[in-house]
Amino acid sequence: MKVLGRSRSGLAKESAFRFTIRENMADAANKYPENVPGKFYVDDQCIDCDLCRETAPANFKRNDDGGHSYVYKQPETPEEEGLCKEAMEGCPVEAIGNDGNGA
Ligand code: SF4
């Protein structure tokens, strides 16, 4: 049976995959060195899907050589803060953290 263009078995596999990868929380110990100091960061689980750069372009950029995102500016307004949180919640592999210690 097709649901929104996908078979049920496909949806089940996708759900299982998302459940599995959701257990992998971002880890400040594995954040990329390009991240600017501050609480938001991207760690080495990034799969370069582009979601964060689309959601919060004022704060996330792509490292073209490495093929991943990083935080190039910490949020400076409530709006940017909200977009960074939205990007963090939407990241499919939880590669974005907000517990950086500013180092
Ligand atoms: S949303 Fe997550 S996986 Fe996608 S580019 Fe940003 S940090 Fe990487």
Image (spheres, rainbow, N blue to C red):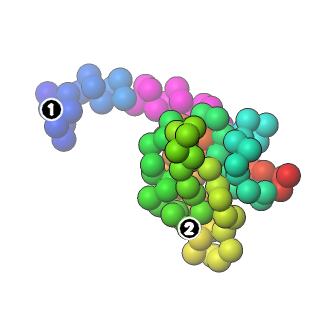
Q: Residues within 10 Å of mark 1 (few under 14, many from 20)?
A: few
Tag of residue 2: 1
Quadrant of res 83: bottom right
Percent x, y for residue 17?
Answer: 44, 26
Horizontal and vertical percent for residue 47? 50, 36
User: Tags 2 and 1 in contact by the CB under 8 Å rule?
Assistant: no
On the image, numbered disc 2 is attached to which residue?
58
Q: Earlier in the sequence, mark 2 or mark 1?
A: 1
Q: Which mark is in front, 2 or 1?
A: 2
Q: Residue at x 49, y 41 (%)?
A: 48
Dividing the picture into quadrants, the one containing residue 66 is top right
Q: Residue at coordinates 45% horizontally, 49% vertically from top-left?
A: 50
Q: Distance between the residues labelled 2 and 1?
A: 38 Å
Name the side, left or right, on which 40 lies relative to 66. Answer: right
**Considering only vertical position in the picture, is 53 above or below 25?**
below
Residue at the (68%, 74%) spot, across then down = 76
Q: What element carries label 1?
A: strand
Q: How many marks?
A: 2
Q: Residues within 10 Å of mark 2 (few under 14, many from 20)?
A: some
**Relative to residue 56, is residue 78 drawn left or right?**
right
User: Mark 1: which amino acid?
Assistant: Lys
Q: In this view, does 89 lie above or below 9?
A: below
Q: Is 39 located above or below residue 95 in the figure?
A: below
Q: Nearer the viewer, residue 74 or 89?
A: 74
Question: What amino acid is at disc 2?
Answer: Ala
Please report the bounds of the magenta region as a residue range.
Answer: 15-25
Query: Is disc 2 placed on a helix, strand or loop?
Result: loop
